[in-house]
Image (cartoon, grey):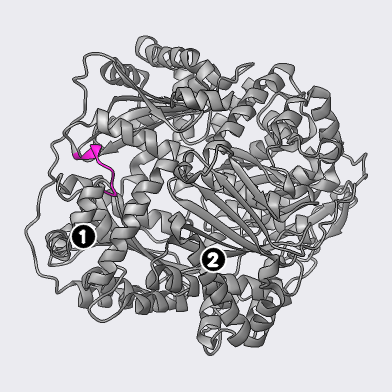
Amino acid sequence: MKKFFTLVLLICLTMQGNLNSLEKKYDPEYILSNLSVPDLQVGQEYTGLIQQVLPSLQGEYFVVLNSGLTILIKEIDYSPVVSCRVTIKAGSIYEGDYLGAGVTHYLEHVVAGGTTTIRTEEENAAILKELGGATNASTSYDHTTYFIKTIPQNWDTAVQLLLSYITSCAFNENEILREKPVILQEMRMRENDPERQLWDMFISSAYRDNPIKFPIIGLEPAFRSLERDDLISYYKERYQPHNVVVSVVGKVNGIEVLKRIIDLSDGFVSTNYNEKPLLREEAQISQRRVEQVHPAAQLTSLRIGVPTVTLLDDNLFALDVLAIILGTGRTSRLYQSLKDEKQLVLSVKAFNWTPTFVNGTFMISADLDNQNVDSVIETIWDELEKIKQSGVTEEELNRAKRKVLAENIADTIQADSISAELSYNYMVTGDPHFHERYVVGIKKLTLDDIKQAARQYFNRDKQTVALLKPPALAVDTADYKQAETNGQSATELVVMPNGLKVLFKQSESYPMTHFALFLNGGLVYENKTNIGISSFLASMVTRGTTSRSKQDISRVIEDIGGSLSAASGKHTIYMTCSVLAGDAQTGFELFADVALNPSFPTDEIEKVREETLMMISKKKESWQSLIMDYFNQEFYKGHPYRFDQLGTEETVKSLTQNDLVAFYDMLFIPQNMVIAVYGNFDKKTITESITTLFGSIPDGRLVQPNAEIVTGTSMVQNVEIEKEGPFPSVTLLYGLPGITVTDKDNYVFDIIDAVISGIMYPSGWLHDGLRGQDKSLVYMVHAFSQFGTRGGHFAILSQTTPENYDQVTDIIEGVITRMVSDGITEEELRTAQSMCITMHELQRETPAAQAFSDGLNESIGLGFNYDNQYASGIESVTIEDVKRVAETHFAHFMRLAVVPEKKTALEQKIGE
């Protein structure tokens, strides 16, 4: 059911004895047994407007109004965020006469933030900035959703705005005309994305009858034919209250929110109940295979699928668990067979995709060299046949159950995830608490259930195979070959005698524990002969210790449903581990073993080497990665920032076990370490473990980075560079001289970002100039800071068409010039400050996010308390500060453009 349903499975299956109060809170059977229909104290004037009160828990208010509108409200006291969301039963499969045109997606573009009969688009944009700017919308096969994340005191304004979208869209002609070329550019971007192309080609081959065969965005000829009247007609047909779910989740007063939504929805009544039946998908009776060559592909991507069931079928549970056993984690059968033993793939995964409107598909996907395709397919079916004949082990079943349950606790801690879950649960099943019923279904699974499901659905004669290949593998000129925070303690910093820093932050009502370890390391500690060694080392630490093999490590963490990973960046090497609170001690002991006792086995070194070389190649499939690599090479000449963190082919091939051990010994010393322990844990027990396991590490000599600090403020003229790439669009990246991450002008750059680009969500001068009003010159444009310990830059990234290239550069450069010459107004400053502070709060919603941010900040010199001081830092910025920083850093820029590759005479002739 992956990708269509994010489950919230808050339960520990393998614990023995009585459940404690926290565990009971998340036990699905306990939750289901305590559901009741509450007597809502809302007053007679509201009671008469409510058609049905749905079963719920304390702090939940689930009702259906007489109009058919469903309202789902959940109070949570630990989150500083409130998520407001409207979900409409309007997706590409319901387009009827417009099927294949993408009218649902087009409508979403026009409705989200557009002019209503209440406010103009500009007024809506101003309100969104006041709310923090964390808003977006999306369209899927069966629903459209609009959401706003903000702080609790702003929930009323957010709900008002969302309801105005779905009830009062004005269908401004200029906005409609503007969005059409934006979507056409989005179509071009999809064509640039191998992963999306693989999905579309697989689905269109696996489904011949159901409307799902058409891409959500639509087919270009049909889309181009859509006009304003078509959007209005579809809006009136689908945006009816009986098709709408409104959800609000966060630290709110549920009764107050319920009354307010009832008041705001007064007059929103259903006038069209016409529901056209969907075309039935005929049973697949033979194999199907489709291949496509993609110009950006560096490796072959494979997807195999067999028809299965819908979301509401009892076999759902066994198939979901089979996906875990076969293709999730290092203990999975396909990972061990295809990657560990035979080394045939870069990656492999399995998932069971189960919508409600058509039978789903059990899918297995892999990235690999094309020469291995046949061997990989045969190995996959060998593994499937083994399960059909012999089933799975009790250990595998219990591990898979635990993994599903634990992962979904993490997925549904955030307010936004909960609001999305409740809305989609109700929309597709009629039950907001369907996820608990799902948990019970998982819990009841037996070994025989697994074997029977495998035998029933793993039928090779009904497989669909999709292959996306690099262009060098094309055998002819054809592209296709078709065949069939609250409640938390304050953060405490403890410095151990050997210099190790430990951060503690407890949250007793939170169901998980998170560990993070940071070391100063990364690119700035590397040299031109060992570039990529930090990334290589991070990949190796989880591949074996002096007492555990890679499989032992994977087995321990997956048996308790946890996660353990390591990675590196420009300035750090870091490890993270997340487990259920009841498994904190087990998780920490494994975490410590991996950090302190890596064995760097030679066979795993060779596997990581091969994987890394494949990843270096695969990165070229991404237009974002391509332009960032080009930019770093030009902007940071002579500085380690110019290098790819994965390394080069030459350095990766040359790294040895001795190199890794020496680099590890240099960095893994206590004075260079910060550990963060956040969430629900016994502090005394964890402290004793840290003292025992980390306290005896001997002191070492701190080393300094190999990079001088560069800020680039000495740039004396503009630099313009143009390169070619394998994509049909033009990508632009402007780099402006920056500062170090510890410079207090960081706050000023955030204000500038908010004014010209909207921080993390599109708005501001750039958006207005390139996509506002009647403009549709780019698919995307955004600004961002990349500041490190040794310098950095401020960037503006955009993607456009070759035809709009010159106009887009003029507008972007006009924005840069305007910031230098005019600065910003007091009103713009106030709005930007509100946006920055709100967005910063949203990013720190969970203890996991806080552990990572606080640990990183302490490691790189900002201090663990930096985030708590962020609001005051932002509020201290003045318009004079903005003018000063702009004059210093925005006077000159580097402009890098990646344009489509020029065709040879032969290619042009073939194209004609």
574 sits left or right of 312 in the view: left
Look at the magenta stretch and give its main secondary structure.
loop
Vertical order, 553 against 40 (above or below): below
Say if residue 503 shows up in the picture.
Answer: no
Q: Position of residue 335 (x, y in %)?
A: 45, 69
Q: Position of residue 694 (x, y in %)?
A: 20, 72
Residues at marks 1 and 2, CA–CA distance in whole angstroms: 44 Å
- Tag 2: Cα neighbours inside 10 Å, few (<14), some, or many (≥20)? some
Range shown magenta: 640-647
Say if residue 550 shows up in the picture.
Answer: yes
* Residue behind mark 2: 377
Q: Secondary structure at mark 1?
A: strand
- Quadrant placement of the C terminus: top right
- Queried whether the magenta region covers residue 326, the answer comes back as no
Residue 546 tag number: none
Amino acid at the residue labelled 1: Met
* Residue behind mark 1: 673
